[in-house]
């Protein structure tokens, strides 16, 4: 088993019944090989049925596109400010800059690891005082699938009349008090990238509050064309609609969404149980009964005092390529260190697990510590920085078996001195 193969964090996993191929074949057979068609409509209908609350959904080419269009829907203009959770993947913040607006980063609370409502309100008041205008949107992020304190965030957002864009890209199927994330705010972002809860190979969706905003999002997603016999443009649009081929994969994946979520839950239970006896390691759990994380990635924290095999030589080598073999190109680096990096025991654990054929990854590095955002305002409390230094993501996807989880935990125990 485990040594012959690599165990990845979360790989795409098709249904046993092969429904994805059936829908994709239908797209070819009926010549709907375009970014619209029966699969796109069907997938959107499936998503609307799943999220409920009478929401409308637009299927898009990526989750990043969904963030971008949500911000346009909120009326974000050049020079505006948007309050983004700092502890996130860059795709929550990058679209703010696509619009010439400024991300203002807000740190996390220790329980959920997500946007701290107290800091959020402080940031709103402070930005209004400094700039004389209100931030245009608030973006909380369901990091690793864990819900944010949506009730308090909505209360604050409503009081200041600022729209909320929920980034539920990692939190598809997570719930607060039984309601699906992405349906509380004005907009909800979903991602179907290859590593997310379900995949369309690459894609995303925007959950919209009503018919009118749905039409507006659709307009901008399809090149912003006015109703004339010729191309007439009065706004700048985008080519962001999902392909009918990809949507076929999505329709098939919707048949196994609940199975995937149940699997990630099972992985959480296993890791919690198997690591309970290990001192200095804690598994990230729902901080309250009101939250129901999808446990997209299960994560652990290593106590800074914990000694891990090889930690004295951590960071001695410059990493070649992307950790975990992510696609695309990464810039080569001559430096083994940056100003902010995970503790040596975390890096040693990553290297140890890697040698055992297990992909592990540090937690996402907060945006307020990223050089590319160094000029942006940030409201910080030290929580995300501390978590970044101590955390490790563990394999959690449907390709990870229960046997694999046991193997992984044994490797973790072996690494601890
Ligand atoms: C993956 C992700 C996105 C973007 O989704 P893509 O489909 O990869 O563009 C946005 N926000 C977060 C937090 C994500 O993890």
Image: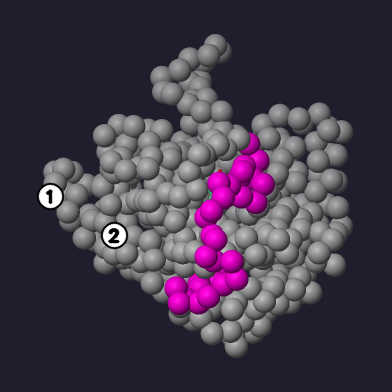
- Image coordinates of residue 292 in percent, x first then y, are 54, 73
Q: Which mark is residue 275?
A: none
Give the crowd class for mark 2: few <14, some 14-19, many >=20 residues within 10 Å.
some
Which color scheme is applied? one colour
Quadrant of the frame with the N terminus: bottom right
Q: How many marks?
A: 2
Q: Residue furthest bottom?
A: 277
* Residue appearing at x 81%, y 59% in the figure: 5
Q: Which mark is residue 380?
A: 2
Relative vertical location of residue 102 with respect to residue 338 in this rendering, above or below: above
Which dot, 1 or 2, sits closer to the camera?
2
Q: Which residue is mark 1?
A: 129
Relative vertical location of residue 380 with respect to residue 403 in this rendering, above or below: above
Q: Is mark 2 within 8 Å of ligand 1?
A: no
* Residue appearing at x 43%, y 39% in the figure: 95
Q: Residue furthest top?
A: 230
Q: Is residue 344 visible?
A: yes
Q: Secondary structure at mark 2?
A: loop
- Image coordinates of residue 332 in percent, x first then y, are 55, 37
Relative vertical location of residue 370 with respect to residue 308 in this rendering, above or below: above
Q: Quarter of the image holding residue 404? A: bottom right
Earlier sequence position, callout 1 versus callout 2? 1
């Amino acid at each position: 088993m485990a040594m012959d193969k690599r165990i990845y964090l979360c790989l795409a996993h098709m249904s046993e019944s092969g429904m994805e191929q059936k829908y994709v074949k239908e797209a070819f057979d009926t010549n709907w090989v375009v970014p619209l068609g029966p699969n796109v409509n069907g997938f959107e209908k499936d998503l609307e049925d799943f999220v409920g609350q009478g929401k409308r959904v637009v299927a898009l080419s990526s989750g990043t596109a969904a963030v971008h269009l949500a911000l346009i829907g909120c009326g974000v203009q050049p020079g505006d400010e948007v309050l983004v959770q700092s502890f996130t993947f860059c795709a929550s913040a990058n679209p703010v800059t696509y619009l010439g607006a400024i991300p203002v980063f807000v740190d996390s609370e220790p329980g959920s690891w997500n946007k701290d409502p107290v800091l959020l309100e402080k940031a709103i008041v402070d930005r209004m005082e400094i700039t004389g205008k209100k931030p245009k949107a608030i973006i909380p992020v369901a990091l690793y699938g864990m819900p944010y304190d949506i009730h308090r965030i909505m209360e604050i957002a409503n009081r200041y009349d600022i729209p909320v864009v929920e980034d539920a890209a990692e939190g598809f199927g997570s719930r607060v008090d039984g309601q699906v994330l992405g349906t509380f705010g004005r907009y909800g972002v979903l991602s179907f990238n290859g590593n997310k809860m379900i995949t369309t190979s690459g894609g995303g969706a925007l959950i919209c509050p009503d018919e009118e905003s749905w039409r507006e999002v659709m307009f901008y997603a399809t090149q912003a064309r006015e109703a004339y016999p010729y191309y007439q443009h009065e706004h700048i649009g985008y080519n962001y609609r999902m392909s009918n081929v990809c949507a076929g994969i999505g329709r098939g994946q919707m048949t196994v969404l609940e199975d995937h979520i149940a699997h990630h839950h099972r992985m959480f239970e296993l890791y919690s149980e198997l690591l309970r006896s290990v001192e200095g390691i804690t598994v990230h759990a729902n901080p309250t009964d009101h939250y129901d994380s999808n446990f997209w990635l299960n994560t652990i924290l290593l106590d800074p005092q914990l000694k891990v095999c090889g930690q004295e030589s951590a960071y001695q080598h410059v990493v070649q390529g992307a950790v975990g073999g992510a696609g695309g190109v990464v810039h080569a680096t001559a430096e083994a260190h940056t100003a902010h990096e995970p503790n040596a025991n975390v890096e040693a654990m990553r290297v140890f697990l890697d040698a055992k054929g297990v992909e592990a990854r540090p937690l996402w590095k907060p945006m307020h510590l990223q050089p590319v955002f160094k000029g942006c305002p940030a409201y910080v409390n030290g929580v995300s920085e501390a978590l970044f230094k101590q955390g490790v993501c563990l394999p959690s996807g449907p390709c990870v078996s229960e046997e694999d989880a046991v193997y992984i935990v044994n490797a973790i125990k072996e690494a601890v001195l």
